[in-house]
């Protein structure tokens, strides 16, 4: 046999071949694996960019909503500062005087016996056909639970039971301290809820998740139960019922919206009058007193302070605990000064007098108090200096003449004040016209002045804890955004907590996207329980539970089921559309001011301005603090080479749903801009709550408002406007039809589409 090659391969041949084949397969699979990894990185990068852009849109939307909301609160305070001024400096011989006095007739607190007589629930009969919930007192747990179920079935509680429940609640609240001391235990947690604002579905969801209030499930509801939502009265009835059933386990704090003047603007007054047309005024009057008796704060285990707004550098819990809180039915305007008579008498020496008439003239230009704080002291005198004819008589004669004139003016003013006080039902004893001022009178007035100063200090304490907001920077300054209260920094929080031996502040008052938020190094917690506050999908609601260890546990929710079926993009787009609609209405309402500002930048009168100038002008006029350059793609559709044709831009924003040719454009614009102020005044002067006001009342309303806003509106323009909105020509104006007649509607854009991301 020779040594030639063998047809049988060597033993290791197959192993070598297999290893090469495996190597070839592995090399082939490396390329797809690398591509997949790169693809995953690109997708992840794209998704992060997508989410970031959605977050930017969400934050811009949030800024729009909050800026518009806080601007409304600021306008509300300015309006009532103006009313304060009018009440202190009115013209005695004028129709406006009577008009203003009548506007504030409802403000005076009735005495206990008078209030119970006025709101006599026993005289109200419940018809046999009534199928709603019924209450018997003293209430039992079953009554409160049945009330919840009845409201779930959209039933309405009869006015008799509403007034009876309010009366019993008022009696209970009067026994409570300003600051409630609450203790926890190992066996049960305490649940703290923030703003509800008339969102009954949120309250139902809280009870569904957490259980109804009971001795084993204590609750603290931290104010702002009413306004904005449509079921505020139902929320109050439920909370008050459980408060009476479990007085040691249910605790209610007052919020800044538990204020009858705030309710005029933000919907609660309107809601009550709509649901209880016959007895609505009695219910509102009783609620005014109930709100004034709500406690101001709570302290848990001597460690956690719970109050609606926050604190300021002057917050003193010891002082707060001693305040007669019921004296402040509204924090928006000071209580009437008892020494007003003597003050006006002193000012009349500077009053303008004319032969044969005793008149007191008020300067036409009124400057509101500094934005950002309530006017705790009386408005400065704006009465013009006395400008009589000079005489060649001796100084003694001039002095005598001035004294005689002053005495006549004093008598006239005293007489008018007596008449005015009687009209509005003031019960204070005042000096008869012409009677001399005795020593006892002077001492009394001095004491009353001190009492007034104390009232103002007490009011400031209450305003600060109801209206204030935390900020990241140290210090304490006026809350210029809301118009009331203050901004308090981490150092103020630390100072107040250390001063009173506390560890943490829990507050509400601000909508938060997640329903809660920590700040000030974890020492301030904001809890907000009204979900979908600005728009469906805008925010979650939340409540917090505290055990004996005082470690917070949060529960978040959204009451609207449709939000669970929406993608993140759809939620952001829905909320964004609503915010932009509100912003466009704001822009239209300031059209004249914006056009003037645009023309200032358009020096060559080309009709065009740059987009940078556009953004600067918007902030200069509106002062909303918004990122206008980021909002430009949503607000500006056509801008060639970075230039905007600003007159056409207004036409693209929005159109008036109902225009009246016989109403001047400046007046129409003023209507849009001050619609909330108008509605507030309308609600006040609609004495019979009929929803109708006369032409004369409408005229006085506009005269007051034009003075407040410093705008010129002719009597003819007001008359033309009144006639144009008197739809049935009966000489009266329907409030709701009036508001609807001047509502902005979006102009449909066929080119509307989602911005590319």
Image (cartoon, rainbow, N blue to C red):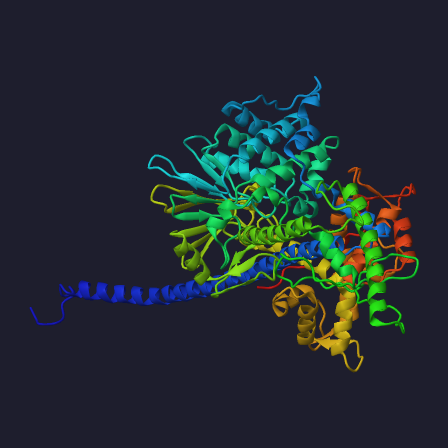
Percent coordinates x, y for residue 495 in the rendering: 42, 59
Q: In the rendered image, is residue 92 in sight?
A: yes
Give the camera-side residue of 454 and 20: 454
Q: Which residue is drawn at 58% across and 55% down?
A: 572
Give the camera-side residue of 419 and 270: 419
Percent coordinates x, y for residue 157 in the rendering: 64, 28
Give the camera-side residue of 657 and 481: 481
Give the camera-side residue of 405 and 695: 405
Q: Which residue is drawn at 48% across and 30% down?
A: 246
Compared with residue 200, is residue 720 higher up or lower down, i.e. above or below? below
Image quarter of the C terminus: bottom right
Quarter of the view holding residue 588: bottom right
Percent coordinates x, y for residue 217 in the rendering: 43, 34
Outermost residue toward the top in this view:
128
Number of numbered discs = 0
Percent coordinates x, y for residue 168 in the rendering: 58, 29
Q: In the rendered image, is residue 333 in sight?
A: no
Q: In this view, does 187 lie to the left or right of 461?
A: left
Q: In this view, does 489 lie to the left or right of 685?
A: left
Q: Which residue is drawn at 59% across and 60% down?
A: 63
Image quarter of the N terminus: bottom left
Compared with residue 23, is residue 176 higher up or lower down, i.e. above or below? above
Outermost residue toward the left in this view:
1
């Amino acid at each position: 046999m020779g040594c030639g090659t063998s047809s049988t391969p060597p033993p290791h041949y197959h192993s070598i071949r297999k290893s090469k084949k495996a190597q070839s397969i592995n090399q082939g699979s490396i390329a797809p694996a690398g591509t997949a990894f790169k693809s995953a990185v690109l997708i992840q990068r794209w998704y992060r960019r997508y989410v970031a852009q959605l977050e930017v849109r969400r934050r811009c939307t949030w800024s729009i909503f909050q800026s518009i909301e806080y601007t409304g609160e600021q306008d509300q305070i300015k309006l009532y500062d103006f009313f304060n001024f009018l009440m202190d400096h009115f013209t005695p011989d004028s129709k406006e005087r009577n008009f203003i006095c009548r506007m504030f007739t409802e403000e005076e607190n009735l005495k206990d016996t008078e209030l119970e007589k006025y709101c006599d629930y026993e005289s109200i009969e419940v018809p046999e056909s009534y199928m709603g919930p019924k209450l018997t007192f003293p209430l039992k747990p079953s009554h409160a639970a049945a009330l919840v179920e009845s409201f779930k079935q959209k039933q309405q509680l009869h006015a008799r039971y509403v007034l009876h429940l309010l009366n019993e609640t008022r009696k209970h609240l009067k026994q409570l301290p300003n600051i409630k001391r609450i203790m926890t235990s190992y066996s049960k947690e305490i649940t703290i809820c923030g703003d509800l604002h008339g969102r009954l579905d949120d309250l139902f969801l809280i009870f569904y998740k957490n259980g109804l209030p009971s001795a084993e499930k204590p609750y603290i509801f931290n104010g702002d139960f009413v306004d904005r939502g449509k079921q505020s009265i139902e929320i109050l009835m439920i909370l008050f019922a459980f408060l009476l059933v479990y007085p040691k386990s249910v605790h209610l704090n007052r919020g800044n919206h538990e204020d009858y003047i705030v309710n005029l603007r933000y919907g609660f007054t309107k809601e009550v009058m709509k649901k209880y047309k016959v007895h609505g005024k009695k219910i509102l009057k009783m609620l005014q007193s109930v709100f004034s008796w709500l406690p101001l704060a709570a302290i848990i285990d001597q460690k956690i302070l719970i109050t609606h707004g926050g604190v300021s550098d002057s917050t003193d819990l010891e002082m707060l605990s001693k305040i007669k809180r019921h004296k402040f039915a509204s924090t928006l305007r000071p209580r009437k000064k008892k020494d007003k008579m003597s003050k006006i008498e002193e000012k009349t020496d500077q009053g303008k007098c004319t032969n044969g008439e005793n008149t007191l003239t008020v300067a036409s230009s009124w400057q509101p108090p500094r934005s950002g704080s309530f006017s705790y002291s009386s408005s400065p005198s704006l009465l013009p200096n006395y400008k009589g004819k000079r005489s060649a008589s001796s100084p003694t004669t001039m002095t005598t003449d001035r004294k005689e004139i002053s005495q006549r003016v004093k008598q006239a003013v005293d007489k008018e004040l007596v008449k005015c006080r009687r009209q509005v039902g003031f019960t204070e004893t005042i000096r008869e016209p012409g009677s001399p001022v005795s020593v006892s009178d002077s001492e009394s007035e001095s004491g009353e002045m001190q009492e007034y100063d104390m009232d103002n200090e007490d009011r400031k304490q209450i305003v600060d804890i109801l209206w204030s907001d935390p900020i990241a920077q140290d210090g304490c300054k006026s809350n210029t955004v809301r118009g009331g209260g203050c901004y308090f920094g981490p150092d103020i929080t630390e100072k107040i907590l250390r001063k009173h031996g506390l560890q943490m502040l829990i507050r509400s008052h601000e909508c938060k996207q997640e329903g809660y938020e920590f700040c000030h190094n974890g020492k301030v917690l904001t809890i907000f329980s009204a979900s979908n506050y600005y728009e469906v999908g805008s925010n979650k609601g939340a409540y917090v539970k505290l055990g004996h260890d005082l470690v917070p546990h949060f529960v978040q929710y959204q009451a609207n089921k449709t939000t669970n079926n929406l993608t993140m993009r759809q939620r952001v787009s829905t909320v964004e559309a609503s915010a932009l609609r509100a912003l466009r209405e704001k822009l239209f309402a300031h059209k004249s001011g914006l056009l003037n500002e645009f023309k200032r930048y358009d020096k060559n009168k080309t009709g065009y301005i740059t987009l940078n100038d556009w953004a600067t002008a918007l902030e200069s006029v509106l002062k909303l603090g918004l990122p206008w350059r980021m909002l430009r793609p949503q607000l500006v559709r056509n801008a060639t080479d970075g230039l905007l044709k600003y007159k056409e831009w207004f036409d693209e924003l929005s159109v008036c749903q109902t225009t009246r040719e016989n109403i001047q454009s400046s007046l129409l614009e003023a209507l849009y801009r001050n619609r909330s102020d108008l509605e507030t005044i309308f609600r006040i002067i609609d004495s019979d709550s009929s929803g109708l006001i006369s032409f004369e009342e409408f005229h006085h309303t506009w005269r007051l408002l034009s003075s407040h806003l410093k705008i010129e509106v002719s009597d003819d323009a007001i008359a033309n406007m009144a006639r144009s909105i008197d739809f049935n020509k009966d000489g009266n104006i329907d409030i709701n039809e009036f508001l609807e007649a001047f509502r902005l509607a979006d102009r449909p854009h066929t080119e509307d589409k989602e911005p590319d991301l």
